[in-house]
């Protein structure tokens, strides 16, 4: 074998590891439905609970009056989204003859959990300080970071070549 | 004298040949088993996954059933991979996983490959 063959061998090994370590059971429909739930949630919050913060900071009393409803709504949407994602991905995994809870699923969830939990804690602090106007942009920001982080395990192990 | 020497020589050669077959590692440190692209592919996929079933391996490698089965059998014979049979929706499902020996052999093969590439630079 020549040098070219060695390099080709390594390249093939790497590509096979990438392809086989994607989380293949993630349901695309659950992502679309999550977006629909979120949009309906923000519509309900805006038109029924009058949640439309223009200022960044609100005094605690005026903020908490409508905020408890919005938080309850957010929890309902979170449960709906997670339930849909688990149910649809579980169905897809079953179809593929795989376990939903496999190593790729664990890696995917771990990589998403770090930015999401960090952002969640920060947003709780913001709420307690009455910084209501910052909630929406911060949720988007940390959600985007979580997706960026998780994308490595959806489209392959691009940055973590350990061998 | 000659009559006495030949059986010994034969015996020695036989032992030597057996030893070569058992180790299967060439001078440059590459494992001869992994000269096959399909076997190397199976090992790569199993190295980063706990378990993979036959159909998934077939999908990754793009080979026929018979071809894949024969390569899997050879790797099993080497003790590099093992299988676990189960049922999913009453259909039999065979999942393969890399053994400790297989992981070690694969890691050593990779190290040898990297060393060879570095040496030639």
Image (tube, grey):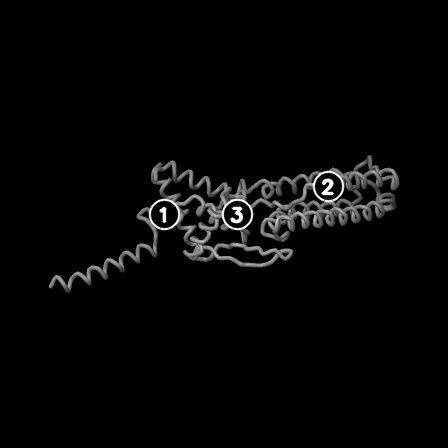
For numbered disc 1, what is the local secondary structure?
A: loop
Q: Residue at x 41, y 53 (%)?
A: B105
Q: Are marks 2 and 1 on the same chain?
A: no
Chain letter of disc 3 in the image: B
Q: Return the x and y of residue B72 as percentages of the image width and height.
A: 46, 52
Mark 3 and mark 2 residues within 8 Å of each other at the beta carbon: no
Quadrant in the picture for the N terminus of chain B? bottom left
Q: Which SS class for mark 2? A: helix
Distance from disc 2 to disc 1, alpha carbons, whole Å, reads: 51 Å
Residue labelled with disc 1: B30
Q: Chain of mark 2?
A: A
Q: CA distance from mark 3 to mark 2?
A: 39 Å
Q: Secondary structure at mark 3?
A: helix
Quadrant where the C terminus of chain B sits is top left
For residue A10, side relative to residue B56 (left or right): left
Q: Residue furthest front?
A: B66
Quick one: B27 or B43, which is closer to the camera?
B43
B43 up-or-down from A28: above or below? below
Q: In this rendering, which labeled residue sits more in front, label 2 or label 1?
A: 1
Which of marks 1 and 3 precedes in the sequence?
Answer: 1
Q: Residue at x 43, y 50 (%)?
A: B107
Left or right of A48 in this view: A37: left
Chain identifier of the residue bearing label 1 in the image: B
- Counting from the top left corner in percent of width and height, residue B117 is at 37, 40
Q: Nearer the viewer, mark 3 or mark 1?
A: 3
Which mark, residue B57? 3
Are callouts 3 and 1 both on one chain? Answer: yes
Residue furthest top as drawn: A54
Q: Position of residue B36 (x, y in %)?
A: 41, 45
Q: Is residue B23 left or right of residue B53?
A: left
> Mark 2 = which residue?
A139
């Amino acid at each position: 074998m020549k040098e070219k063959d060695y390099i080709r061998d390594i390249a093939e090994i790497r590509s096979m590891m990438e392809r086989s370590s994607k989380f293949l059971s993630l349901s695309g429909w659950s992502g679309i439905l999550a977006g629909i739930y979120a949009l309906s949630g923000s519509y309900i919050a805006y038109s029924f609970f009058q949640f439309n913060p223009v200022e960044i900071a609100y005094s605690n009393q005026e903020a908490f009056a409508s905020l408890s409803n919005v938080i309850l709504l957010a929890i309902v949407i979170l449960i709906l989204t997670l339930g849909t994602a688990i149910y649809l991905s579980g169905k897809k995994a079953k179809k593929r003859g795989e376990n939903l809870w496999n190593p790729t699923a664990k890696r995917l969830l771990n990589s998403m959990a770090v930015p999401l939990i960090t952002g969640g804690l920060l947003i709780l602090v913001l709420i307690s300080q009455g910084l209501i106007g910052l909630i929406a942009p911060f949720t988007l920001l940390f959600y985007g970071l979580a997706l960026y982080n998780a994308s490595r395990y959806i489209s392959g192990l691009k940055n973590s070549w350990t061998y | 004298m000659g009559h006495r020497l030949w059986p010994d020589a034969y015996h020695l050669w036989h032992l030597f040949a057996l030893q070569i077959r058992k180790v299967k590692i060439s001078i440059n440190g590459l494992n001869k088993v992994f000269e096959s692209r399909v076997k190397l592919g199976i090992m790569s996929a199993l190295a980063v996954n706990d378990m993979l079933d036959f159909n998934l391996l077939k999908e990754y490698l793009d080979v026929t059933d018979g071809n894949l089965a024969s390569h899997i059998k050879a790797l099993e014979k080497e003790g590099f991979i093992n299988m676990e049979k189960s049922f999913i929706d009453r259909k039999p499902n065979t999942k393969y996983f890399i053994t400790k020996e297989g992981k070690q052999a694969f890691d050593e093969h990779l190290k040898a490959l990297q060393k060879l590439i570095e040496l030639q630079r």
